[in-house]
Amino acid sequence: MTTPTSEEKEYYDLTKRAFNFLAPFYNVMTLPLVRVRDQVAEFANADKASTILDVATGTGQQAFAFAKLGCDVTAIDLTQAMLDIARKNARNGLVKFEIADATQLQFETNSFDITCVSFALHDMPLMIREKVLKEMMRVTKANGVIVIADYDLPSNTIGRVLIYHLVSLYECKYYKEFIATDLESLLRKIGVEAVEKVYVLHGAGSIVKGVKKV
């Protein structure tokens, strides 16, 4: 195991402190994403036969959207406080919650039909983001699906400027670097072919579906 860089240490410290504090309010804060969670599960073409890994699950809302379709869902997060709330809200027993670091997944290669990360990559510095995506790719089965939902910008200039400055007011410092990154190029770099993209939240977000190359 390599020694974490100073930027990685800062990220882990910030993430745990922030989300331990935000956990009791997180479901209310993310109410605008309720419909998007269902869209992600539908866009992934998940069904009852699908095994799912939901990365950075938080309070489990994305995991529950997959579980509603009858999928076998494993959901991980760094923050115990978030997982405590997720477990309290779990009703049908179809989601297994585990505390884990997504840059060092303990699952075997080619374990899941679908891996998903929803509105979490923008909270990560690039080096962490790339490690997470590489690990997601590794544990996804050959020709399996990787789904990423996160912030984006509308196509029109006025909308782009307004959304960018609005989101910058409340999101962490990594957002600006994330929004400037070509996500599809990053996916190609790690061996994932982006095959479909749909915009959500009036263009302020998008869902990208990739396929693991054999």
Image: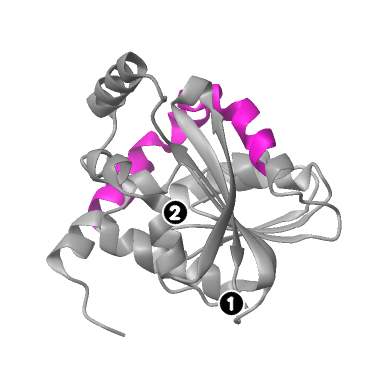
The answer to whether residue 101 of the structure is visible from this angle is no
Magenta span covers which residues?
Answer: 13-40
In front of the other: 143 or 165: 143
Amino acid, disc 1? Phe
Label 1: element kind = loop
User: For residue 113, what is the image quadrant?
Assistant: bottom right
Q: Quadrant of the C terminus?
A: bottom right
Q: At 34% across and 38% down in the image, what residue appears?
A: 21
* Residue at which label 2 appears: 184
Label 2: element kind = helix
* Residue at which label 1 appears: 107
Q: Is residue 167 left or right of residue 209?
A: left
Chief secondary structure of the magenta span?
Answer: helix
Q: Is residue 112 left or right of residue 163?
A: right
Above or below, 16 against 212 in this view is above
Q: Is residue 132 left or right of residue 90?
A: left
Rounded to the nearest whole Å, what is the CA distance between mark 1 and mark 2?
A: 25 Å
The answer to whether residue 6 of the structure is visible from this angle is yes
